[in-house]
Amino acid sequence: MMSEKKPDQVVFNEEENRYDAALKPYATDVSAPVITIPDTVAWKNTNVHKVNKQVKAKYDELKAQYDVLMEEFEYNNLVYNAKFTFEPIVGEIYHLYRNRKEEPFLSIIAPSECSFDHLGTFRLNADKMWERL
């Protein structure tokens, strides 16, 4: 026995043997509203641009923090590798000089009171880190 073929405009599910036009996720009738795909290109481009700006701003912020940290590291490395024969006191100000042999040394003598090559003025903070003044 041959089953009767339904017309094209009729949505009949032959596996379940029922009409299921209302259950389809797409239009099944000529009079159904037109399915339009939303244009997401403009939305994507706008948001990609915003995200790129945000990521760049965060990168610049982190890079600035990194640069400050590296500068602090270099100063601490320079001062801790300098010669000094005393124990520095937290909160006090010290001066870093270079002697005739081009070796750095730490002193409490101010630059106006001596003729050494002055490299910088530093203070030892509570974290035992040298801060350049």
Image (tube, grey):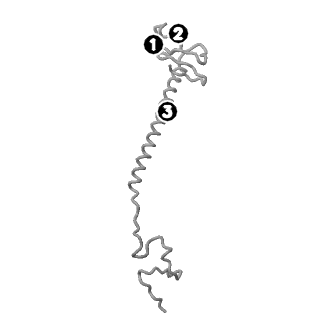
Instruction: Answer above or below: position of 131 versus 33.
Output: above
**Is the residue marked by circle 1 packed among few (<14), some (14-19), or many (20+) residues within 10 Å?**
some
From the image, tell me which residue sits under label 2: 109
x then y, percent, for residue 124: 57, 20
The amino acid type of the residue labelled 2 equals Ile
Of residues 111 and 85, which is closer to you in this image? 111
SS at badge 2: loop
Q: Earlier in the sequence, mark 1 or mark 2?
A: 2
Q: Position of residue 130 (x, y in %)?
A: 55, 22
Query: Label 3: how many residues lie within 10 Å, few (<14), some (14-19) or many (20+)?
Result: few
Counting residues from the start of the chain, the first of labels 2 and 3 encountered is 3
Q: Mark 2 Cα within 10 Å, few/some/many (few <14, many 20+)? A: few
Name which residue type carries label 3: Gln
The answer to which of 128 and 80 lies nearer the viewer is: 128
Task: Check residue 51 in the rendering and tell me which mark sits there, or answer none.
Answer: none
- Percent x, y for residue 62? 48, 36
Mark 2 and mark 3: Cα distance apart in space: 32 Å
Q: Secondary structure at mark 3?
A: helix
Q: Is residue 88 left or right of residue 98?
A: right
| Residue beneath disc 1 | 117
Q: Position of residue 78 (x, y in %)?
A: 51, 21
**Circle 1: residue type:** Asp
Q: What label sits on residue 65 in the rendered view?
A: 3
- Of all residues, the one furthest to the bottom in this rendering is 1
Q: Are marks 1 and 2 in contact (CB under 8 Å)?
A: no
67 or 46, nearer to the observer: 46
Callout in the foreground (1, 2): 2
Q: Earlier in the sequence, mark 3 or mark 1?
A: 3
Q: On the picture, is 71 further left or further right than 37?
A: right
CA separation, marks 3 and 1? 30 Å
- The image quadrant that residue 125 belongs to is top right
